[in-house]
Image (cartoon, helix red, strand yellow):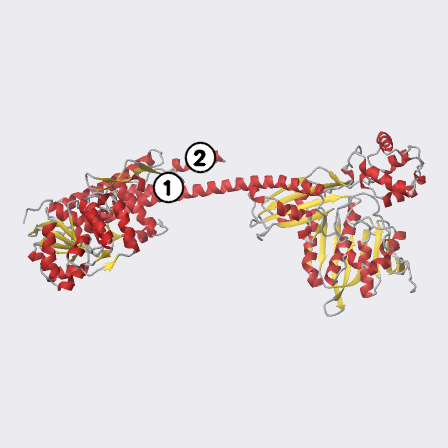
């Protein structure tokens, strides 16, 4: 009988072996994901303290790697809060270490993406990553790091402390990686443009390997209020979460456990629930058996009297900023935006924001341009599978006088503490009925607004055309009839023209 | 030969036309001057407003009228085109120039008045005819000339440069074109006592060669197929002003029969006009019964011919016994014959034998 060997692998090792699931599928996708992850970390770092983000990204060519791939150096600078020096090695050199284990709306979910990018760079080029950061104090810290993949530990190659006279605050990450920029270029540029659209308060600068500069300038310093951290809602828990909470809880009774670890549970609700689930309020949560924990989870989901989660943990863009972003990046003739009231799916709160834009610099493509966002991240792949795309396709746009051949762009933004992505790659959103309904209602609202705009415009056009026809023919009729009747001067047609105009105005 | 009947008929009519055009202009001018959107009324030309009038033996328009108003944006362009067409006609008439429908279409472009196509400009001219009750020839707009006249008739031109000049219509052996100059001429004298209208140019030439005009004391008119309006009006003037009976010879088929009928009773297309038809003219042949009686070489009637016969059968113009009998005979024998078919009896048979018999028969 063959002996089977079991070995434990580190988190870094796991992701090294399964880098596909984090999006590093091929050289072009890898370079796109690396840029995206670092930019998102930078945006989060600035926004969490209400700092209007200032982000500079540079990709420079370092040499050939193989026939199709090149080596690039990626440098991302931000003006975020900076990382305290003692956390720098772990924050950038240890997978699954980070600050993102709380429930509030954030771009990244696990603090995984940035480190995956660095890990990918190390795997492909065997070069250390350079991190420079300061929290705005008189010193700046510079680390050269590598990741010990087997042990999931940062290896410090070099460390320096520099004087920070200007009291600069922010983080710079620089590392080399293999990639195929020229295939990734369209997506990367799309990514910046769309990121600028939903972050109109951010300055984004990108210098590509050919030295081309792309600059997306903020039009406002106003930012949406930051999300509040929140406890998990009872409807959204699973056994794993319950076990973790039981492990760390300082509370000795079920009543307290429920009240202090869950969102929207007070004394009365806790009592009602415990009565409903026939669990003693004084029971010590640490004494719950595995079966009881499973039962608790089911009962939590079944109990109808929990209030829905409130949305204070969410940070939607808001109608004004959304509109400003669309106007800034698409320069349309008309734009309508709408923010839905908060809703929930499986205990997770979410808010849908939609926008529709018409004309101006929006191209006519024969299909609607669809821009999808989740927690202010542009979603660029797998459009056809996305719930927003499906709702848009299923809608009867003709009813609203909107035709596919018109220059129309539609934007859907979903923000949630847990965006229902269908894959780990964060590229498209699953078709949840609750989410679908909110998107559909939001789109109907902006569709009505664009319908109003289109029909009014059509009316104005018609009237202008009508007046044009009268102005063309009335003088001729006057002239011909004057000659025909043998009169001296043509009759006055101004009164008739004026009445045509008045008639048109009455109709409008 | 009788005395000249209507010495000044041509000039009188010209005056009326000019007056009509000027009044139209004045009416529109005044409406605009008063601050109103000008409008025009005219009888409707739609088929359900066309009826056959037994009294005057032609199609006429009923009481239903349509209004073209400038207030209606869809009428604006046709209305402008109509006023322009009136002005154009006015200029033609007063400058004594003539023109064709094709000319009208192109001339409009000089006034930045484009017509979509020939049909659109033709329709506008027809509107003008309907409003004023004159035919386009009165506005000096003529179709291509193709019919001709020959015989002892002296005419006096009224066209510029020829005023007062006379012409004897026997002076040219090919006949004289029935064009603008001839149709606007006054009739001075004739020795003829009848008019013979012939459908085809070949037979017209044969008749001239065989001296039919002398032998039967007649004026010969070649209609060249369906007679143009100018020719129909010319035949009417011959009949009316010179008091001459008119005999019509066509091919022996439904189409020939209808050529004769349009000369006699007019067409539905011209229901808005008067005095284009000659109600007393006679269809003298070739009849279906002639085909039988003269044992003419024939061709079978095809599907189109039969269809046409069924249409004619329902036509109110075909209610006289002679016409009904001929339609029935055609349907029975299912054969047709051309005028040239008489050549089987020799080239002169038609002139020496057939013609006198038929003139007598339809007298």
- Along the line of sight, the residue nearer the viewer: A508 or B65: B65
- Along the line of sight, the residue nearer the viewer: B292 or B301: B292
Q: Quadrant of residue A335?
A: top right
Q: Residue A466 placed where, x, y %?
A: 44, 41
Residue most extreme to the top: A268
Residue appearing at x 22%, y 54% in the figure: B256
CA gap, disc 2 to disc 1? 17 Å
Q: Is A386 on the left or on the right of A301, as rendered?
A: left
Which residue is under mark 2? A503
In the image, is residue A25 above or below residue B329? below
Residue most extreme to the front: B332
Which chain letter goes with mark 1?
B
Instruction: Please tell me whether mark 2 or mark 1 is closer to you in this view.
Output: 1
Tell me the crowding category of disc 1: few under 14, some 14 to 19, or many 20 or more residues within 10 angstroms, Cα based.
some
Residue most extreme to the left: B1
Q: Quadrant of residue A95?
A: bottom right
In the image, is residue B274 above or below residue A8? above
State whether residue B103 appears in this view. no
State whether residue B189 appears in this view. yes
Q: Residue A375 placed where, x, y %?
A: 74, 46
**In what element is the residue under mark 1?**
helix
- Along the line of sight, the residue nearer the viewer: A83 or B78: B78
Q: Residue B73 placed where, x, y %?
A: 40, 40
Q: Is B70 on the left or on the right of A286, as rendered?
A: left
**In what element is the residue under mark 2?**
helix
- Answer yes or no: are tags 2 and 1 on the same subunit: no
Tell me the crowding category of disc 2: few under 14, some 14 to 19, or many 20 or more residues within 10 angstroms, Cα based.
few
Which residue is under mark 1? B75
Find out whether the residues at labels 2 and 1 contact each other: C-beta distance under 8 Å: no
Q: Is B108 on the left or on the right of A254, as rendered?
A: left
Q: Residue A359 placed where, x, y %?
A: 57, 48
Which chain letter goes with mark 2?
A
């Amino acid at each position: 009988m063959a002996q089977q060997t079991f070995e434990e692998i580190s988190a870094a090792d796991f992701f090294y072996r399964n880098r596909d699931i984090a999006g590093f599928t091929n050289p072009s996708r890898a370079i796109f994901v690396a840029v995206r992850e670092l930019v998102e970390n930078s945006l989060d770092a600035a926004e969490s303290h209400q700092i209007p983000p200032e982000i500079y990204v540079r990709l420079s060519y370092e040499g050939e790697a193989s026939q199709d791939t090149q080596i690039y150096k990626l440098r991302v600078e931000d003006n975020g809060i900076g990382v305290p020096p003692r956390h720098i090695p772990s924050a950038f050199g240890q997978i699954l270490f980070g600050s993102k284990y709380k429930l509030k709306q954030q771009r990244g979910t696990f603090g995984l993406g940035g480190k995956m990018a660095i890990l990918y760079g190390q795997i492909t080029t065997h070069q250390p990553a350079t991190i420079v950061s300061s929290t705005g104090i008189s010193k700046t810290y510079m680390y050269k790091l590598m990741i010990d993949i087997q042990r999931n530990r940062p290896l410090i190659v070099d460390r320096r402390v520099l004087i920070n006279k200007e009291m600069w605050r922010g983080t710079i990450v620089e590392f080399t990686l293999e990639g195929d920029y020229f295939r990734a270029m369209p997506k990367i540029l799309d990514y910046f443009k769309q990121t600028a659209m939903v972050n109109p308060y951010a300055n984004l600068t990108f210098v590509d390997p050919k030295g081309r500069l792309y600059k997306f300038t903020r039009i406002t310093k106003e930012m949406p209020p930051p999300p509040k951290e929140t406890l998990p809602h009872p409807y959204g828990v699973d056994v794993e979460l319950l076990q973790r909470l039981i492990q760390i809880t300082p509370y000795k009774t079920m009543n307290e456990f429920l009240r202090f670890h869950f969102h929207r549970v007070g004394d009365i609700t806790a009592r009602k629930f415990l009565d409903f689930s026939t669990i003693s309020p004084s029971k010590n949560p640490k004494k719950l058996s595995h079966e009881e924990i499973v039962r608790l989870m089911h009962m939590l989901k079944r109990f109808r009297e929990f209030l829905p989660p409130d949305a204070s943990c969410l940070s939607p863009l808001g109608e004004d900023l959304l509109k400003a972003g669309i106007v800034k990046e698409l320069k349309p003739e008309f734009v309508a935006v709408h923010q839905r009231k908060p809703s929930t799916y499986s205990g997770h709160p979410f808010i849908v924001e939609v926008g529709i834009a018409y004309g101006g610099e929006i191209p006519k493509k024969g299909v609607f341009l669809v821009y999808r966002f989740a927690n202010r991240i542009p979603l660029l792949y797998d459009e056809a599978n996305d719930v927003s795309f499906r709702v848009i396709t299923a809608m009867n746009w003709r009813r609203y006088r909107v035709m596919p051949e018109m220059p129309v762009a539609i934007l859907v933004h979903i923000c949630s503490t847990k965006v229902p992505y269908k894959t780990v790659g964060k590229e498209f959103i699953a078709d949840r009925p609750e989410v679908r309904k909110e998107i559909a209602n939001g789109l109907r609202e902006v569709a009505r607004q664009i319908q109003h705009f289109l029909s009014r415009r059509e009316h104005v056009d018609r009237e202008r055309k009508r007046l044009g026809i009268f102005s063309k023919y009335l003088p001729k009729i006057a002239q011909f009839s004057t000659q025909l009747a043998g009169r001296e001067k043509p009759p006055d047609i101004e009164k008739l023209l004026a009445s045509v105009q008045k008639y048109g105005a009455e109709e409008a | 030969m009788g005395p000249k009947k209507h010495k000044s008929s041509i000039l009188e009519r010209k005056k009326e036309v000019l007056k009509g055009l000027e009044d139209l202009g004045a009416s529109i001018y005044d409406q605009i001057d008063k601050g109103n959107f000008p409008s025009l009324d005219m009888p409707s030309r739609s088929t359900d407003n066309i009826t056959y009038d037994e009294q005057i033996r032609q199609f006429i328009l009923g009481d239903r009228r349509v209004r073209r108003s400038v207030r209606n944006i869809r009428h604006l362009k046709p209305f402008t085109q109509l006023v322009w067409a009136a002005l154009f006609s006015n200029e033609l008439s007063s400058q004594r120039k003539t023109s064709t429908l094709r000319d009208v279409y192109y001339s409009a472009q000089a006034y930045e008045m484009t017509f979509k196509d020939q049909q659109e400009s033709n329709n506008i001219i027809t509107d003008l005819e309907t409003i004023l009750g004159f035919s386009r020839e009165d506005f000096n707009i003529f179709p291509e000339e193709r019919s001709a006249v020959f015989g002892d008739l002296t005419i006096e031109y009224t066209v510029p440069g020829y005023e007062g000049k006379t012409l004897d219509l026997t002076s040219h052996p090919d006949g004289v074109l029935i064009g603008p100059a001839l149709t606007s001429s006054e009739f001075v004298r004739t020795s003829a006592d009848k008019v013979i209208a012939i459908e085809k140019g070949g037979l017209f030439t044969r008749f001239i060669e065989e001296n039919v005009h002398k032998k039967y004391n007649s004026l010969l008119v070649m209609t060249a197929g369906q007679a143009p309006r100018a020719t129909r009006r010319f035949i009417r003037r011959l009949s009316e002003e010179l008091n001459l009976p008119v005999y019509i010879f066509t091919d022996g088929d439904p189409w020939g029969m209808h050529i004769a009928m349009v000369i006699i009773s007019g067409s539905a297309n011209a229901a808005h006009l008067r005095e284009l038809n000659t109600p007393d003219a006679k269809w003298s042949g070739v009849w279906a019964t002639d085909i039988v009686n003269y044992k003419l070489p024939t061709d079978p009637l095809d599907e189109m011919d039969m269809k046409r016969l069924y249409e004619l059968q329902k036509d109110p113009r075909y209610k006289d016994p002679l016409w009904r009998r001929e339609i029935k005979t055609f349907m029975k024998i299912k054969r047709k014959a051309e005028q040239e078919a008489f050549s089987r009896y020799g080239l002169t048979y038609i002139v020496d034998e057939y013609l006198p018999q038929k003139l007598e028969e339809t007298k």
